[in-house]
Amino acid sequence: MMNWNDFFKDLQKWMEASNMMMQKLGLGSSQYWKWCIETLGVLENRYPHPLVVKFLVDILSYQDEAVSQIQGRKQNENRIS
């Protein structure tokens, strides 16, 4: 049986670690994305449930959108300069 309480506690810990890694490495860095994918894979293996996969995919999607927004802003700034 899936222990959702443990999953969400671990997910919260992951999010805190993710914030620290973003500050250290930068959201758009390849090092951050390597860390992100590897550690989300650990959560997926620890909690093998289809809904967990959906949560983790949504997290990756959200991160990807954030990078796209940052890159879009940088491109606009470069056009203005």
Image: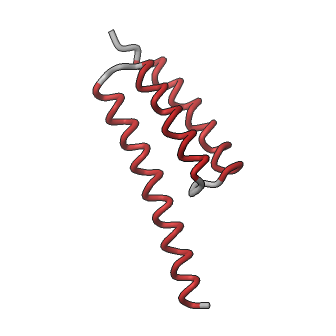
Q: Is residue 74 above or below residue 55?
A: below
Q: Residue at x 37, y 36 (%)?
A: 55
Along the line of sight, the residue nearer the viewer: 62 or 4:
62
Is 10 situated left or right of 17 in this image?
A: left
How far from the left and from the top, in percent, is residue 72? 48, 73
Residue farthest to the right?
24
**At x 47% / y 51%, what residue is drawn?**
63
Q: Residue at x 45, y 18 (%)?
A: 46
**Residue 27 picture location, percent across and down:** 58, 54
Q: How is the image coloured?
A: secondary structure
**How many numbered discs sit on the rendered protein?**
0
The quarter of the picture where the N terminus appears is top left
Q: Quadrant of the C terminus?
A: bottom right
Residue occupying the point 63% across, 44% down: 19
Q: Residue furthest bottom?
A: 81
The one of 73 and 39 positioned closer to us in this rendering: 39
The image quarter in which residue 17 lies = top right
Q: Residue furthest left?
A: 50
Q: Position of residue 69 (x, y in %)?
A: 48, 66
Q: Is 5 on the left-hand or right-hand side of 80?
A: left
In the rendered view, would you say 72 is above or below 13?
Answer: below
